[in-house]
Image: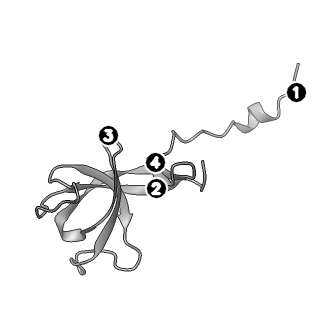
């Protein structure tokens, strides 16, 4: 794929002004706080980078103000796909093999 998987957050759009960017209230998007201006309760004008819609994977590549979103519980593992140049959901995390099984002699 590309870069190592990262954890992103889930956001529901609570209210959204009518624009041509395709974002609608009630949609759940995967994203992370915008690194230059992250939103918080003390900074309601901060932004969140929305990567893709969770239901169908449609790319958003948009910023939304923090006070127009509601953060949902849970995290999503994402990774950057170099072939499509987009962030996608990563597969389930592989569990490491137990130490006892790694060092068993082969038969």
How would you rate the neighbour count of disc 3 (Cα within 10 Å): few for under 14, some for 14-19, many for 20 or more? few
Specify the label residue 105 is tagged with: 1
Residue 102 is situated, as x and y percent measured from the top left of the image, at 78, 35
Depth check, mark 3 against mark 1: the one in front is 3
Q: What is the quadrant of residue 35 in the picture?
A: bottom left
The count of marks equals 4
Asked if disc 4 and disc 1 are in contact, CB closer than 8 Å, the reply is: no
Residue 1, percent from left and from top = 60, 47
The secondary structure type at the circle numbered 1 is loop
* Distance Cα–Cα, label 3 vs label 1: 46 Å
Label 3: element kind: loop
Looking at the image, which is closer to me, 44 or 52?
A: 52
Query: Closer to the observer: label 4 or label 1?
Result: 4
Nearest to N terminus: mark 3 or mark 1 = 3
What is the C-alpha distance between the residues marked 4 and 1?
Answer: 39 Å
Tell me the tag on residue 7.
Answer: 2
Residue 22: x, y in percent?
A: 22, 54
Q: Is residue 80 left or right of residue 41?
A: right
User: Which badge, 1 or 2, comes first in the chain's sequence?
Assistant: 2
Q: Which residue is mark 4?
A: 88
Instruction: Measure the alpha-carbon separation of dots 1 and 2.
Output: 37 Å
Where residue 91 sits in the image (x, y, percent)?
51, 40
Q: Residue, x 14% and y 62% (percent of image)? A: 16
**Label disc, if present, on residue 56 of the rendered structure:** 3
Callout 2: few (<14), some (14-19), or many (20+) C-alpha neighbours within 10 Å?
some
The image shows residue 94, relative to residue 27, as above or below, that is above
Q: How far, Cα to Cα, is label 2 from label 3?
A: 19 Å
The picture quadrant where one finds residue 98 is top right
């Amino acid at each position: 794929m590309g870069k190592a998987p990262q954890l992103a957050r889930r956001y529901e759009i609570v209210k959204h002004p009518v624009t041509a960017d395709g974002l609608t209230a009630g949609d759940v998007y995967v994203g992370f706080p915008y690194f230059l201006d992250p939103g918080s309760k003390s900074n309601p004008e901060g932004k969140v980078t929305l990567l893709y819609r969770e239901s169908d994977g449609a790319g958003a590549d948009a910023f939304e103000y923090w006070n127009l979103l509601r953060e949902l519980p849970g995290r999503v593992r994402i990774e950057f796909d170099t072939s499509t140049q987009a962030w996608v959901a990563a597969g389930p995390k592989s569990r490491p093999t137990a130490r006892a099984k790694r060092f068993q002699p082969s038969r």
